[in-house]
């Protein structure tokens, strides 16, 4: 079956107002794709695209945005286009985007189709192509422009895979413009670019670096590790390189090939936004004997390692956040199922009445259970099922935390020992502290074993048998024989300390949790407080329920406070900020702290301290009035799981008002400077 053209006139929207936020724009484009028969589920496509947006913003300098995804709801590789009026913020540093491409690929999209999508992404670094998009007067002109880019004439064709040998990247014109760079002193740089989906940023970064190298008179060879395939750089090519650039978000395949080379490492977007700076840094480190270098022995390594040579403080934070990020879906699913169980069957389901067996075996025997239901009937049975399902999901919290901490260190070979470590932590009652410790031990054990020198014929057994076996053995023995009792004692002591808190001490804890939840709005500190609350959540432990209530209520404050501030004093905020404020009402009500990020990013010195003040007030009041929460997420939509609901609302409103007043006062006392700078630059 022949695939349809990658874009058609009915996939183009010209000079439209598609909404006030990127969510609305993406929704409008997704609906356009569905109407054209290119997608089977609008919500599914929007969800996949927004999941990619959550990894990193897709806004680019120059008023461009390229939201993109792979999704099972996409029928064929497709490009949807919207020229917006007004523009919408997609996270670019220089302002909103008015040219938006939704690049959608099916999960099983072949390499040829990935090349078509990536060709468009590469064209967006060319000013002439972008100018033509803005000048086009009809949808057909846009289609022609896109088609000429993704299907160029054979003589102009240029594949997105790597350049196998280092050909000089500088044109004759570029060389004549830089006569001071003698051939003998020309540097050769090898670069790797890779983004999470491997569709757009991977190739845009490659082209941006290539153009910057031309301007600097530097030879560059680039390996794009993307969806359309990758031709690894030859060993001789790497050997001739004076320095290496890793512009990646997802790790470098066979990183050990570059061992010993001076390296400049960053996320992939920096290569798009600051390619000249990265080339200059690569030239500088090539002549610096003290520069950071790629570790290893020069042999091919496992498929993926950390995407940057960063300090151990940053690396440790990345490792722990990886574990927390993968754990949160278990928290949300399990916690909300437990909360629904309470809604259907009441809180007594945690301690079921005599004669009502909520064990899994009994619940599975549906035909027997339905004929012997106690008072409460079917609703109580459904509540018991939901409660049991939630408990099963919750039982994966610590294993998932440990497993993905280990995964962040040692990649896939670390998963089995990491999950084993988490299961042992649960068995010895080490709690989330045991999970963290076990995950770290498992990951580093797996990494150490993976670096062992073995014969070539034996290497195939390493990732699937040898590494998981021996790493699991190491961490299991250590956890059982040495660390189990101390970890259990620490966890028990922490639990007893929290349970014994009363009066002033418990209020101080609420203040600390409130400050943490509002400090970085979804970042490491916020996630640490959230993980502390969710992993320790126990419906039989009132202190853990108070901590959960304080964390969720404080996390709702920042978006609600900014929404209130933009409503009561709109003149202090720009039009995009006022639009974000309107959306922040729902985000805050849903416990999505990230709804305040646009405000904090634009004015951190005023916004973040104000939000922390509001969060501290809410956390303190939650603790003071003994508010409890049996669900780990959901905001106001899990009101049925909140104990002392009236005081929960009072605490939330108080923190919201304090945060809004603080940010309004801060903005009045010292007016922000960015608007004046924008006017100057425009002038």
Image: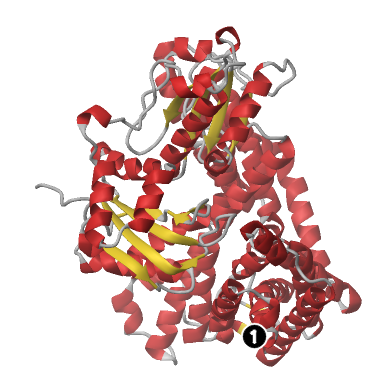
Q: Is residue 180 left or right of residue 3?
A: right
Instruction: Residue 133: tell me if it is visible.
Output: yes
Q: Which residue is mark 1?
A: 567
Closest to the observer, 462 or 189: 189
Res 351 quadrant in image: bottom right
Q: Is residue 169 left or right of residue 263?
A: left
* Residue 87 image offset from top left, x and y in percent: 47, 66
* Residue 39 image offset from top left, x and y in percent: 25, 62
- What colouring method underlies this structural image? secondary structure
Q: Residue furthest right?
A: 504
Element marked by disc 1: helix
Name which residue lies at 37% across and 53% down: 69
Q: Residue furthest front?
A: 683
* Residue 492 image offset from top left, x and y in percent: 76, 59
Name which residue lies at 43% across and 27% down: 223
Closest to the observer, 626 or 230: 230
Instruction: Residue 474: tell me if it is visible.
Output: no
* Residue 364 image offset from top left, x and y in percent: 35, 69
Res 94 quadrant in image: bottom right
Name which residue lies at 80% across and 77% down: 668
């Amino acid at each position: 079956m022949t695939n349809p053209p990658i874009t058609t006139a009915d996939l183009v929207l010209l000079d439209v107002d598609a909404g006030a936020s990127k969510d609305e724009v993406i929704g409008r484009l997704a609906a356009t794709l569905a109407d054209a028969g290119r997608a089977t589920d609008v919500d599914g496509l929007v969800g996949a695209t927004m999941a990619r947006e959550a990894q990193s913003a897709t806004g680019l300098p120059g008023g461009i945005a390229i939201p993109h995804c792979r999704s099972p709801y996409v029928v064929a590789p497709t490009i949807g286009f919207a020229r917006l009026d007004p523009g919408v913020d997609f996270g670019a540093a220089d302002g909103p985007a008015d040219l938006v491409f939704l690049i959608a690929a099916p999960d099983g999209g072949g390499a040829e189709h990935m090349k078509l999508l990536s060709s468009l992404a590469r064209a967006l670094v060319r000013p002439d192509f972008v100018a033509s998009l803005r000048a086009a007067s009809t949808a057909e002109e846009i289609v022609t422009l896109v088609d000429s880019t993704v299907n160029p004439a054979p003589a102009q064709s240029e594949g997105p895979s790597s350049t196998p040998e280092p050909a000089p990247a500088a044109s004759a014109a570029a060389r004549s413009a830089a006569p001071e760079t003698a051939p003998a002193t020309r540097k050769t740089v090898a670069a790797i670019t890779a983004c999470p989906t491997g569709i757009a940023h991977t190739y845009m970064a490659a082209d941006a670096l290539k153009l910057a190298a031309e301007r600097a008179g530097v030879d560059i060879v680039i390996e794009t590790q993307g969806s359309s395939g990758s031709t690894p750089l030859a060993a001789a090519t790497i050997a001739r390189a004076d320095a290496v650039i890793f512009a990646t978000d997802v790790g470098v395949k066979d990183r050990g090939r570059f061992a010993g080379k001076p390296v400049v490492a960053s996320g992939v977007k920096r290569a798009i936004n600051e390619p000249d700076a990265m080339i200059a840094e690569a030239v500088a480190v090539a002549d610096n004997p003290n520069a950071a270098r790629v570790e290893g022995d020069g042999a091919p390594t496992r498929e993926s390692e950390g995407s940057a040579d960063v300090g151990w403080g940053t690396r440790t934070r990345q490792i722990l956040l990886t574990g927390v990020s993968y754990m949160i879906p278990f928290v949300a699913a399990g916690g909300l199922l437990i909360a629904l169980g309470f809604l259907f069957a009441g809180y007594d389901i945690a301690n079921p009445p005599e004669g009502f067996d909520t064990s899994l075996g009994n619940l599975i025997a549906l035909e027997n259970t339905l004929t012997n239901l106690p008072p409460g009937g079917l609703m109580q049975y459904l509540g018991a099922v939901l409660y049991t399902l939630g408990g099963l999901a919750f039982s994966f919290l610590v294993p998932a935390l440990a497993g993905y901490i280990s995964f962040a260190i040692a990649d896939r070979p670390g998963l089995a020992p990491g999950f084993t470590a988490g299961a042992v932590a649960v068995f010895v009652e080490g709690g989330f502290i045991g999970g963290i410790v076990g995950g770290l031990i498992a990951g580093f054990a797996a990494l150490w074993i993976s670096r062992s020198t073995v014969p070539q014929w034996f290497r195939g057994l390493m990732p699937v048998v040898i590494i998981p076996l021996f790493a699991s053995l190491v961490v299991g023995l250590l956890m059982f024989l040495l660390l189990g009792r101390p970890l259990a004692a620490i966890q028990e002591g922490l639990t007893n300390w929290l349970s014994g808190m009363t009066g002033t001490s418990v209020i101080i804890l609420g203040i600390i949790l409130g400050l943490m939840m509002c400090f970085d709005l979804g970042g490491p500190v916020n996630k640490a407080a959230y993980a502390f609350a969710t992993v320790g959540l126990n419906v039989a432990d009132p202190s853990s329920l108070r901590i959960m209530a304080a964390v969720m209520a404080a996390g709702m404050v920042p978006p609600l406070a900014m929404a209130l501030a933009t409503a009561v004093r709109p003149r202090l905020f720009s039009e995009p900020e006022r639009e974000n404020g309107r959306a922040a009402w729902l985000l805050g009500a849903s416990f999505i702290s990230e709804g305040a990020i646009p405000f904090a990013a634009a004015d951190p010195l005023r916004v973040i301290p104000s939000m922390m003040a509001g969060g501290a007030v809410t956390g303190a009041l939650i603790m003071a009035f003994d508010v409890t929460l049996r669900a780990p997420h959901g905001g106001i939509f899990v009101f049925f799981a909140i104990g002392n609901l009236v005081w929960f609302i009072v605490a939330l409103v108080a923190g919201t008002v304090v945060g809004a007043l603080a940010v309004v006062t801060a903005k009045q006392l010292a007016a922000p400077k960015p608007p004046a700078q924008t006017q100057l630059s425009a002038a």
